[in-house]
Image (cartoon, coloured by chain):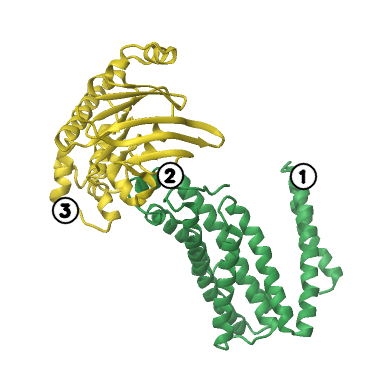
Chain colours: A green, B yellow
């Protein structure tokens, strides 16, 4: 595809822009910023990936993965302001997800240890874990707020912090995992996943594209489970002090 | 009269978000007695009870439970020894039995059906309630269930936070009789927040009057009949029912 041909797709930006203006939605500025950012960021990453694929150096792969983890951590931490050490907790969660998924994929020789495989799959895992972390923190905050009396009751009767938040913690973990499980149930029926579509458009054999997609959805399920469980068990103890008194509230 | 301290407060202060809630509170709640805490909203009464149960920590000052500093108690042990019935009477969305069994469940123990029935009868609730959905009970029944649940821990000290404020007169009278029975029969020390001065007069051995985080007056119920302190006079005149 030439840049000239690609520029024709700006019509897909023009349609929402015109609709936003005529319906007075006030989103024109956001649409413009989002368009410019997506073009600049994707082109930049395209050139960066091109460079890394050319050199195929493990150091650059590591730096790229590290960059993804840092950006994802900084983005997700906004939902956890007020929790002591939330940045470290999210970083530990994302690093663990990355190590486990890549450990299995590379350790068992499922994918080759090249930038072409490691970077896109890492991006999917870290990105998904980031979304899951945000979903979990949102849900956990809502659960705690809605059930403040219950938490206080359990503590007042001699329960431990773990007992006081257990039901809300499990509920938040479950709620943040459900979208991943539900999307897997309809995958291929309602929509073709982005990676698979990309491979097919790029000329790959559809069967091979499907095989990779299956690999990804299986890994994403582990990613979803690990992200919410690890973050949940790292976060809840910091909401209480050593006298089992509540000390922090998750803020919006 | 030989009075032993159940809870002693020394220079107790509590500040939250730079707002002074309690200021230099000193006093003793006596063992086996009923002490009522009265005072306008915002006086710091609930905060005081939550500190005695260990849900909140003082900003400064000390609390002694049975002559032992509160911080020397393991938190879960303290909260079982000093039980609290919260004003909102929080009820779990489960059966009456599961609500009653909660204090035991938290300790990994089992509450037998006989014990549960006995606990219900203790608060004048019929055994037929045992397997009903607890959230469907009336306000008075929920409050009784809340008290029965607190009593499962066999606390030496029972803290009651406006437990009759939302109840009809009949339920109020029944709860008052119940608390008197718990106090007389089991010797449980009662510290009871109430806005109802009639209740304070007929039930208390001792009364504390709190205002803006300070203890204005304490003593036997005669302090509710009149005072030279203007703020106490104002409260008694405005709050007398």
Give the labeled residue for mark 2.
A148
- Locate residue A169, reporting x and y percent: 44, 57
Instruction: Name the disc covering residue A21, or none.
Output: 1
Who is closer to the viewer here, A23 or A27?
A27
Disc 2 crowd rating (10 Å Cα; few below 14, some 14-19, many 20+) is some
Residue at image location 70% in from the left, 82% down from the top? A115
> Which comes before the other along the chain, label 2 or label 1?
1
- Locate residue A108, reporting x and y percent: 54, 87
- Locate residue B151, reporting x and y percent: 23, 42
Who is closer to the viewer here, B195 or A50?
B195
**For residue B16, side relative to residue B225 (left or right):** right
Vertical relation: B233 (above or below) B62: above
Q: Is residue A203 visible?
A: no
Q: Is residue B206 visible?
A: yes
Residue at image location 34% in from the left, 14% down from the top? B240
Q: Mark 3 lies on which chain?
A: B
| SS category of the residue bearing label 3 | loop
Give the labeled residue for mark 3.
B112
Check the picture and name the quadrant holding the N terminus of chain B. Answer: top left
Disc 1 crowd rating (10 Å Cα; few below 14, some 14-19, many 20+) is few
Who is closer to the viewer here, B170 or A241?
A241
Vertical relation: A213 (above or below) B124: below
- Locate residue B158, reporting x and y percent: 27, 37
Q: Which chain carries label 1?
A: A
Query: Could you tell me how far apart the alpha carbons at marks 2 and 1 are, in whole angstroms?
Result: 44 Å
Vertical relation: B1 (above or below) B97: above
Query: Could you tell me how far apart the alpha carbons at marks 3 and 2 are, in whole angstroms?
Result: 29 Å
């Amino acid at each position: 595809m030439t840049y000239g041909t690609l520029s024709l797709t700006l019509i897909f930006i023009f349609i929402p822009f015109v609709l936003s203006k005529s319906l007075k939605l006030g989103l024109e500025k956001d649409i413009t910023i989002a368009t410019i950012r997506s073009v600049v960021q994707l082109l930049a990453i395209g050139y960066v990936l091109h460079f890394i694929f050319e050199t195929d150096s493990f150091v650059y792969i590591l730096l790229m993965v590290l960059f993804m983890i840092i950006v994802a951590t900084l983005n997700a931490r906004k939902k956890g302001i007020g929790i002591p050490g939330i940045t470290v907790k999210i970083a530990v969660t994302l690093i663990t997800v990355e190590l486990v998924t890549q450990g299995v994929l590379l350790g068992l020789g499922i994918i080759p240890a090249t930038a072409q495989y490691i970077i896109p799959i890492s991006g999917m895992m870290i990105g998904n874990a980031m979304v899951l972390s945000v979903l979990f923190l949102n849900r956990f905050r809502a659960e705690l707020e809605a059930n403040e009396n219950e938490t206080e009751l359990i503590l007042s009767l001699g329960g431990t912090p773990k007992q006081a938040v257990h039901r809300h913690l499990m509920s938040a973990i479950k709620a943040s995992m459900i979208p991943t499980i539900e999307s897997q149930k309809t995958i291929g029926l309602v929509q073709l996943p982005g990676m698979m579509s990309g491979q097919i458009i790029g000329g790959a054999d559809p069967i091979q594209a499907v095989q990779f997609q299956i690999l990804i959805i299986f890994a994403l399920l582990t990613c979803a489970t690990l992200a919410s469980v690890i973050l949940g068990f790292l976060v809840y103890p910091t909401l209480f002090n050593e006298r089992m008194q509540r000390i922090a509230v998750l803020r919006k | 009269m030989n009075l032993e301290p159940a809870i002693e407060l020394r220079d107790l202060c509590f500040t939250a978000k730079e707002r002074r809630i309690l200021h230099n509170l000193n006093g003793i709640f006596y063992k086996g007695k009923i002490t009522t805490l009265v005072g306008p909203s915002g006086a710091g009464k609930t905060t005081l009870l939550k500190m005695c149960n260990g849900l909140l920590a003082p900003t400064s000052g000390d609390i002694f439970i049975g002559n032992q500093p509160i911080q020397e108690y393991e938190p879960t042990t303290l909260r079982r020894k000093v039980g609290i019935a919260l004003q909102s009477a929080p009820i779990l969305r489960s059966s009456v039995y599961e609500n009653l069994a909660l204090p035991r469940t938290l300790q990994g123990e089992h509450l037998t059906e006989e014990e549960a029935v006995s606990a219900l009868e203790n608060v004048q609730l019929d055994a037929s309630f045992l397997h009903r959905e607890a959230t469907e009970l009336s306000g008075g029944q929920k409050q009784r269930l809340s008290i029965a649940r607190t009593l499962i821990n066999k606390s030496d000290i029972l803290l009651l936070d406006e437990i009759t404020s939302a109840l009809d007169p009949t339920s109020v009278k029944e709860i008052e009789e119940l608390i008197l029975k718990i106090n007389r029969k089991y010797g449980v020390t009662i510290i009871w927040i109430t806005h109802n001065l009639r209740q304070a007069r007929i039930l208390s051995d001792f009364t504390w009057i709190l205002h803006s985080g300070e203890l204005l007056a304490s003593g036997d119920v005669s302090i509710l009949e009149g005072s030279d302190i203007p703020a106490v006079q104002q409260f008694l005149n405005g709050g007398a029912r």
